[in-house]
Amino acid sequence: MDTNHSDFDALEARLTDPSIPLKSARHVATDAAASAAGREFLLREYGSTEVIERAMIAPGRPHVGERSGASPAVRGRITPTDYAAFKKLEEQTGRSQSDLVREAVHQLLRRHKLIS
């Protein structure tokens, strides 16, 4: 299906126009019936249970480092001036606070020769 912005604009207009009635749902599955319907849909789309399992994405953020499970977390407070500069650095680099903190900790550990 070839779609473009005008198709989505038309759809948005139709769905948000209060003078156009929306069709009510014919059948709403719940509980076990919803689970079964979802499984049937996935099997139709993916073809097999094995492919579905490979396509599943683990919930949560990816682990940092080589272990599995939760990554160790460090928390600290900084001055408002440092925080403003830190936010500016975040904007300038486009990197997350977590990524910047990981780099800063790594540099500090190297400077103190605790890691190589």
Image (cartoon, rainbow, N blue to C red):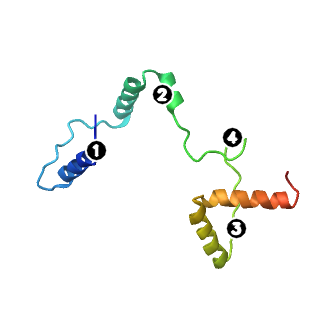
Q: Nearer the viewer, mark 1 or mark 3?
A: 1
Query: Disc 1 and disc 2: Cα gap in Å?
Result: 30 Å
- Crowding around mark 3 (Cα neighbors within 10 Å: few <14, some 14 to 19, many 20+) is few
Where does residue 62 sit, x and y in percent of width and height? 61, 45
Mark 1 or mark 3, earlier in chain:
1
Q: Which mark is residue 104?
A: none
Task: Write the residue at 16% across / 47% down.
Answer: 22
Label located before the other in sequence (1 or 4): 1
User: Which label number is shown at residue 52?
Assistant: 2
State how far apart marks 1 and 3 are (Cα). 47 Å
Give the secondary structure at mark 3. loop
Q: Mark 1: give few (<14), some (14-19) or many (20+) Cα within 10 Å.
A: few
113 displayed left or right of 35 = right
For disc 3, the marked residue is: 76
- Give amino acid for label 2: Ile
Q: Position of residue 37 (x, y in %)?
A: 34, 30
Q: Mark 1 or 2 closer to N-term?
A: 1
Q: Nearer the viewer, residue 68 or 34?
A: 68
- Looking at the rendered structure, the secondary structure element under dot 1 is loop
Q: Amino acid at mark 1?
A: Asn
N-term-proximal mark, 4 vs 3: 4
Question: The residue under label 4 is which amino acid type?
Answer: Ser
Is label 2 in contact with label 3 (beta carbons under 8 Å)? Answer: no
Q: Which residue is mark 1?
A: 4
- SS class, disc 2: helix
Of the pair 93 and 105, the residue shown nearer to us? 93
Residue 79 in the image: above or below residue 111: below
Question: In the rendered image, which quarter is residue 66 located in?
Answer: top right
- The x and y percentages for residue 5 are 28, 48
Dot label at residue 68: 4
Mark 4 neighbour density, 10 Å: few (under 14) some (14–19) many (20 or more): few
